[in-house]
Image: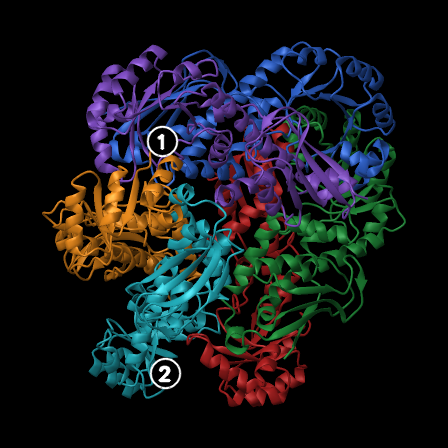
Chain colours: A cyan, B orange, C purple, D blue, E green, F red
């Protein structure tokens, strides 16, 4: 139900208000009210499409509930250059006013999905899944994670409350990996699994002894990752993270880890190049 | 007053709510309340710092009004690898809980400023200014434009209501460049300038005849831009836009245009790599 | 899109909440639910009607989406005494509950439009346009400016961000008219025109030298205004402001100024006298 | 606690957002940050001052919690021309930015109080009190009623839920004055009094028979009002309403009614003429 | 119009957000989208049903405007064990997601109505009415009072502004019962009645002398209540309050008081036991 | 950080608005502004105190940031009859206005904690923990769960997104216990554990085969629960639920289950009896 979520509506409202301000001065002055139009959203280069359901949310919040939308492609599919993605029929002036907000949403979500797909393809054939992180653009957590999933990636925790991930600072505060896991086990509620970040083989050994659910190998060299996987030997899931790039992702995946997490999917994906063409129907 | 603006507060709230959810399960379980801590935000590679005033907004909205912050660098300055940017003293548990949201804000703003600086340097010595567009991340208009300015760029319109920019669709609706400018002149209020998008030399000639304020050369080749600049000859400001890259920016600038607008500053800037180190003071 | 603007919706919600509180004690007790009714809004004296689109916003926010409304007159038209303006069919009890809020909106907007029309008629035949100011009732900026336009006036800036208007205090801070205009030119973005307030002929002369876009003659006598217009001689637009009344407007207009701004249009317009008659259809 | 009420804060936020938009383009460009200033609010003609507590709310919502305010006059007092009302010390740029919103609030509240005082003085020496109505500017209910009280008037119901006022339409729906009062008595809760609108002597007689608390004489001639007062003879409170002006108020008051209600206090009060003078302290 | 009230919508939104968080992890994983379902809400023991109109509000706020609801019983009616109360047809996955929030609303409102009915039956045949208090669950004032009315009770004040109830602390501040009533009479507006709390016969005597509207006998023994009723002798309405239970209610009612107020109706009513059965229609 | 959570602030605002409305008519009329007072909150019978941190949130939202509060007891402690819990010093009139809202919050939280403590004591000495459910009062999820923890209980899931709990309807939709667990495992993210509801020994056997994390025995007789515990033999955690009362809790706990969940902790806890005594300090 991502797109019905109230925080999506809040973000869309913020986006409309910041762009439209007190009104579209250009369109009001140059385009008469009441002229029907048809807008076509087009991808200018090959992309993995993501975010089409945002159209209906943008239109609803913009008072354009009567807009008729036809999707020309399916969410998560790759399309080639100059492919029409969606057509929207409404008053031409209204279509012009919401053009930029609409494209700004779609170009980011499509950009994230497109980059994710490249990582997914890079590790194809290994057991590893590409997963996202909490390094999302503020305000965009749900949309960023949705786009990763549309691109074929998996989602890690959505926030600080739906999983326990013990990092270096937590370990320091508890005086060690084992003690930290013990405290997490008694303090969290019982349907949250526990993951612990390990930087050395010693950390890994200590974590294994506690029966932790997931071990996160942070910033290890590929050779170290491979050794850690051997030691863990299936007694916990294994996630590798830290500076993963399209170049290094496959080598890491081939060590046998379960998950490769990539912050760049959401913090540095370039936007897709989309445009909206308008036809006046009068 | 960017950082006092209510839409910044709305975005910060959205960001805190989506990340913290019902609480930080890991920190609550592993770090005792009341332990004082000191967090240091560090740049891991050379960047142009932007966004430090967001710290106070994040802390205020997170109920951390008592946090003491010391900035170690100035907004808009370039810093080298591993440079401390800011230090924050507060309860350790609270610092851990807001770590990711804080970094997510700073890493994007710093990323935008850093990329902008590269464009600004690319056109140094020409008369051209680098300007942004409305291709910002939804919800981030003010922060994205602030970061561009911190990086040395100039801001174009903030929204649809503080300037008139006549694009192809408006021209079609009016039946021509001249007619569109005429309607805009009588329809907008009198403190808004008028800019018109031109795709051909004929458009430019027609626009010049109307005494328009700014002419936007859209997706023209460098040679065409140069010719347009000659024809316009100072009778209007000239902006060049469309697929500008770090490679092409200087050549375009050298044609004598006043403004080079770059959508990528805000829609495709990679995040800066920042981290927060925590020291427990007990 | 004024009436779809989120701040209109916020104002309407505020108005409904402050009037209805926890419910309409009188109607709940005295009028059975379910009885259909028809309400007719009537002007009790000649007015210029403005604000009819607010009806649909009030009904939507009051949960009366099913109300059927028929407008009997057109927005901006003058109607005589006892003219029906609109008819609304819905449950009688609901119509009674929203009667006062609805009338309170319409009587103010119609009052502003009616007063504006009188000023417009007072300057008819001159080149001058009647324009509004930012002296609107807090919360009512968009509606007040909409009503001025419905009455035949023109709108000046909508806020502090869509135009540059340099006033005496800004001039003092910069050390002079010329310096102030220079700073404004480099500091604002390039699609905002610049207007400067002048109190003396010396100010006017200095402003003219800078090529400013609009010159505001503040609180000058008619004779001075006339002289300033002669000196400016078309090199800038000219606005006259300060204590303009229905008695003085024409004389000022006849000096040849482009704009006569009148704060009283929005801060002191008397409300129109409207009433709502209800017919129970059972 | 009027000025701590959340709907006042909502209105102030709306007012700041609609005026400031994305920022004060003029002040940002022309006045350096950090220069201290002192603003003095001055009445340009004799007024009854009302609304001073709004200053602190405006400043709080504008992020100007550090502004120091000294009031020079007391709320509800009459002051002469060119009297300083309040002085505010803060950064000059911030004072310029909130100047108009602040004055817009004060000039309306002071205008309402000033007009109310004239009505109060008109009926001085009679038993009648001047009371307001629900014909307030939407969004302004609490502030309008506060200003009436500051001017020496009394407040009638604040909304539809804190008193029962049976009007013509309610009477029609119940089939008569007596039946309506009976239904109101059993349907409302027991701490709400009941007032009934009467248009004829027959209505008055029927109302008296029910022991109603207050009788509202609507649009009656002075002679009729006098007769009604005689008949009621203290068995209910008496309110006169409908088209009351400064000219007719005293005659109505002299009939012996308890309350004279005047819609114009809040729907048609002209704004007071206030200005803010700024002194730069550097 | 209780269920159209904005504070109900705010409460429903809060309830949906706190329960659904970022999405229904279980249903998303296990139930395919698009499968139609039919949910039946069933009472597992005899109850007085209250709150059915909340269904439409919950569905609207959850983006389930297309759900079709059929009520099987009437609001305020007693139903036996295992009685179907309402049937809802919508997508099965959506029904599962809003199951708990929906039941949590209905089980509380039905619980309050059921307990109220028992008190109403306990005093049947006396002149006394059972009334509620302001001891409602925070956020639930309108719904709690609605449920009391559905159970056959009467509502007392809805808040601090729709009636005057002078308690011990107010009396102390004024220096006595008589003085307090006098101040209340001149300070409140004229459509609010005045009730005063009395703890002794002396208080009652003093209150009677002022012609107060309602006398509240607080925490008196039944014998004292009876005596107070005799003394008051119809010159004011009489309310008894303080530790009333199902055991003591009738005796208190038989003294001849008009109102018996019971805080426990809303602060301690046990929830009704309701369940939702789901049938997949595929 | 429960009490800094934005949804707590939203609930507190709702509570203040619904109770105070447009102002406290009684206190405004009878208690002069500016008189200092001291309020003491007292428990009238033995309770487990919970909710003291809400005081600061209520005061902040009510504009009473200057109130000084001294707690007399510790959160989660049992106190006897007539024990002072907290003292608050502020203006007397303000204390009177927020009295009821403050008590309404504390009496519910203390009631929930007190009831929880009785269950916790009932199972003392067994391995079982008392846990809550999602059967909380809408709007109160965080506060209800906080109060359960203050009473010594443990918290189960906070919402639908922080754990996977497969119920009968999910099982039906998947065609069986095993299939449902399989789908949940691949569909949820990897830090959520999986719990499955079992109604028969066959369900338990099937669930055990899948290696599920927690088995919920729903509405089983004590004898059946005991048998299920034997069969599960530590291979999954065991939770018992369904109609648990203070009478049956211990017997269920003695079967060896890990968790006994009790909906009544939050849906049917009677409010504690608290009062606020006010002393005027003048």
**Residue projecting furthest to the left:** B125
| Letter of the chain that mark 2 sits on in the rendering | A
Q: Answer whether residue F281 is visible to the viewer in this image.
A: no
Q: Position of residue E157 (x, y in %)?
A: 70, 41
Q: Secondary structure at mark 1?
A: loop
**Mark 2 crowd level (few <14, some 14–19, many ≥20, 10 Å Cα):** some
Q: With respect to residue E255, does D150 lie above or below? A: above
**Residue shown at the point (43%, 22%) measured from the top left:** C262
Q: Position of residue D28 (x, y in %)?
A: 28, 35
| Letter of the chain that mark 1 sits on in the rendering | D
- Tell me the number on the disc at residue D67: 1
> Relative to the observer, which residue lies in front, B77 or B173?
B173
> Relative to the observer, which residue lies in front, A155 or A278?
A278
Query: Which quadrant of the figure contains the C terminus of chain C?
Result: top right
Q: Image quadrant of residue D163?
A: top right
Q: Position of residue E45 (x, y in %)?
A: 76, 68
> Relative to the observer, which residue lies in front, F20 or E277?
E277
**Mark 1 crowd level (few <14, some 14–19, many ≥20, 10 Å Cα):** some
Q: Position of residue F215 (x, y in %)?
A: 55, 81
Residue underneath mark 2: A236
Q: Secondary structure at mark 2?
A: loop
């Amino acid at each position: 139900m991502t797109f019905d979520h109230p925080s999506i509506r809040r973000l869309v409202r913020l986006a409309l208000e910041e762009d439209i301000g007190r009104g579209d001065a250009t369109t009001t002055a140059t385009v008469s009210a009441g002229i029907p139009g048809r807008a076509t959203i087009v991808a200018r280069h090959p992309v993995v499409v993501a975010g089409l359901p945002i159209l209906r949310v943008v239109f609803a919040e913009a008072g354009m509930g009567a807009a008729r939308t036809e999707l020309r492609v399916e969410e998560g599919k790759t399309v080639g250059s100059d492919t029409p993605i969606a057509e929207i029929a409404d008053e031409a002036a209204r279509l012009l006013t919401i053009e930029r907000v609409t494209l700004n949403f779609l170009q980011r979500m499509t950009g994230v999905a497109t980059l994710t797909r490249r990582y997914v393809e890079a590790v194809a054939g290994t057991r590893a899944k590409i997963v996202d992180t909490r390094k999302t653009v503020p305000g965009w957590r749900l949309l960023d994670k949705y786009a990763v999933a549309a691109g074929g990636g998996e989602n890690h925790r959505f926030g600080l409350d739906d999983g326990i991930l013990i990092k270096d600072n937590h370990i320091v505060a508890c005086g060690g990996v084992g003690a930290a896991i013990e405290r997490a086990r008694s303090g969290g509620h019982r349907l949250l699994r526990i993951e612990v970040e390990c930087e050395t083989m010693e950390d890994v050994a200590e974590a294994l002894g506690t029966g932790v659910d997931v071990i996160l190998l942070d910033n290890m060299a590929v050779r170290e990752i491979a050794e850690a996987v051997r030691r863990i030997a299936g007694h916990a899931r294994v996630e590798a993270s830290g500076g993963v790039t399209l170049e290094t992702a496959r080598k890491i995946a081939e060590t046998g880890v379960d998950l490769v997490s990539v912050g760049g999917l959401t913090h540095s994906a370039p936007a897709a190049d989309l445009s909206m063409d308008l036809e006046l129907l009068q």
